[in-house]
Amino acid sequence: MNTSTSPQRPPQVASAELRPVTALRGVGDALAQKLQKLGIETVQDLLFLLPLRYEDRTRVAAIGSLQAGERAVIEGEVQLTEVAFRGRRQLLCRLSDGSGSLTLRFFYFNASQQQSLARGVRIRCYGEIRRGPGGFEIVHPEYRRVASDAPGDVEPALTPIYPLTEGVQQGRLRQLTSMALREVANETIRDWLPASALRELNLPSLREALDYVHRPPPDASLEQLSAYMHPAQRRLAFEEMLAHHLSLRLLRREVQRDPGWAFQPQRALMKGFLRSLPFKPTGAQQRAWADIERDLAQPSPMLRLVQGDVGSGKTLVAAMAAVRAVEAGFQAAVMAPTELLAEQHGRNFAAWLAPLDLEIALLTGKRSSAARTRALADIASGSAQIVIGTHALFQEQVEFHRLGLVIVDEQHRFGVHQRLLLREKGASSGRYPHQLIMTATPIPRTLAMTAYADLDVSIIDELPPGRTPVKTVALTESRRDEIVLRIRDACRQKRQAYWVCPLVEESEQLEAQAAEETARVLAEALSELRVGLVHGRMTPRDKDAVMSEFKAGSIDLLVATTVIEVGVDVPNASLMVIENSERMGLAQLHQLRGRVGRGSAESNCVLLYRPPLTEVARERLGVMRATNDGFEISRRDLELRGPGELLGTKQTGLMQMRVADLMRDADLLPRVQQTAELMLAENEANIAPLLRRWTGRGEQFGKV
């Protein structure tokens, strides 16, 4: 992707920024390969490998002033060194400084080490102070001998602790970062940000920030550094968020530069579709559709994200967009993350579109060879007007006749690259299809503007009429028998229930109940009920058969793994039991709970857990009990898990922040967006080197 249309020449990049790390003394090919695992290929990369934490080795503490749990530098004279056998062989060294004494304990040692710690030797050591059998001790301290008449120099700055990879020790990384800082000491490491942005935020220059974070002065606040709230850290976090935001803005601009198809519909098909529905779209659905309809009429590709809570009716809006595409003479493709969701969409679309006599093709990885061959032929010929499938849609064998609209469901399950691959498959005559992205993982609007900066955002914040909030309780697994009775009562009232387990087979390691074993036990306890089982290892045909029976009411209780997390719509189901709920994230629990409460009957969700609960698990279950609001749950999930997991970016490379944290640094986001606007308008030549610094080739990921 070309990130600049300005005739201005990009500024000259300082040599140290692109110099390979092998240019540093002592870095050969073997060490370079190990450093590459930390993302270090250039001298500049070393500067942006930031410490995880810091240790204060700038002063020597008196042994008599130490407290358990702190890490400290101490210096003293060896009083006694001996090998002891207390359960295992160990070397014990008694050290005294006049104010007190403590023990140095070594489990791994040799004769030379024992001799070096002879009585009367003076040493300086560093480690964590612990309580031992004979008072304070340090286990395997870092230490060195010092002259008895002239104490050695203390460290001039706080000691950084870096992330490690096999074969690279902390001391080596500290040496390398010191060399990198010296390399650029006499050169200019370019500050690509507008000076006005730094002034308004009162942030230091890049060089000042790097010096500080790698070698904080002795009086630096460890508390502030640990919280990543020092201005030097904030300076780097701001630049990193800006780089990621700009990469998405450039992606959006690049995609929209490509010509698209302006849909000029006849409207008769859409009117027929809306007349045939047994319900009226909600106001929120109509507002989202108005945004989409306006985009589809433009000659540039639509890039729109529709956010909506579980059960808010995003699929209907997607179907309306697909009808508009067909009405304009194009094909529409719907990509779902799982076979089960693709099959559910297939059923919904088939039911809604039956009066219109449109042909729908289903393409998933596990379809029979004959069915797949037929589907591929129908897609290529154009007789299949709407194509629904999993990631199988962008495989090489799939050729569309005239793809005008790409719909991606559950965006957080896919990466940016995957939906761009499907977009490329629709390229025809130099034109590209519209893109509609859907997610049932609502995120705060400010975060959405940064995380989805390549997309316009529409929100469906209204549930269809008749939906009742689901009541949620958390119970220990010791009350399982009570839950079984509740299932019996619900089914006697002609309702249905889910029982969700996280595993297919028993696992001693996870200590979780397996779905197959649970189904057997529940079938014995509830012999008068019809119990079904569905899990990810079943064939699509078998899963479909069980789900169809459950939807038809032929199964009372469905035992399932989390394959039913999305895509299952059974309005008669009013009770959800989630086993081992303490092991699941908030977003997943909320998605599972969304399988009930889809009808007018009062619905309940029971979160079974195995005590003791961790603090995080306790918070999660508390949030689930307190609210049904997907946006509030998403906000709390962000706090507990971070945005990378929630936004589905861990597998894509996008938003993999080295310094920034989108929740912690959320107050910087508005200024990130303003600075991005400024750079795009006035400093575009600075953008490419900024992206190289933080995202590697990120500025080019718009073209796949």
Image: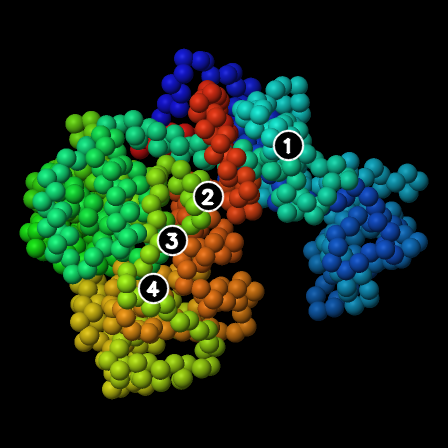
- Whether pointer 1 and pointer 2 mark residues with C-beta atoms closer than 8 Å, the reply is no
Q: Is residue 298 or residue 168 the one in the foreground? A: 298
The answer to which of marks 1 and 4 sits earlier in the sequence is 1
Residue shown at the point (30%, 31%) measured from the top left = 255
Residue shown at the point (40%, 24%) measured from the top left = 3
Residue 59 percent location from the top left of the image: 82, 43
Give the residue type at disc 4. Answer: Gly
Reply above or below: 51 against 484.
Answer: above
Numbered mark located on residue 441 in the image: 3
| Local crowd size for mark 1, using a 10 Å CA cut-off: few (<14), some (14–19), many (≥20) | few
Give the residue type at disc 1. Answer: Asn
The answer to which of marks 3 and 2 sits earlier in the sequence is 3
Q: Which residue was labeled with disc 2?
A: 446
Q: Where does the C terminus fall, quadrant-wise?
A: top left
- Whether pointer 4 and pointer 3 mark residues with C-beta atoms closer than 8 Å, the reply is no
Q: How is the image coloured?
A: rainbow
Q: Where does the N terminus fall, quadrant-wise?
A: top left
Q: CA distance from mark 1 to mark 2?
A: 22 Å
Q: Which residue was labeled with disc 4?
A: 594
Q: CA distance from mark 1 to mark 4?
A: 45 Å
Q: Quadrant of residue 665?
A: top right
Q: Which residue was labeled with disc 1?
A: 202
Instruction: Say which of marks 3 and 2 sits in front.
Output: 2
The answer to which of marks 3 and 1 sits earlier in the sequence is 1
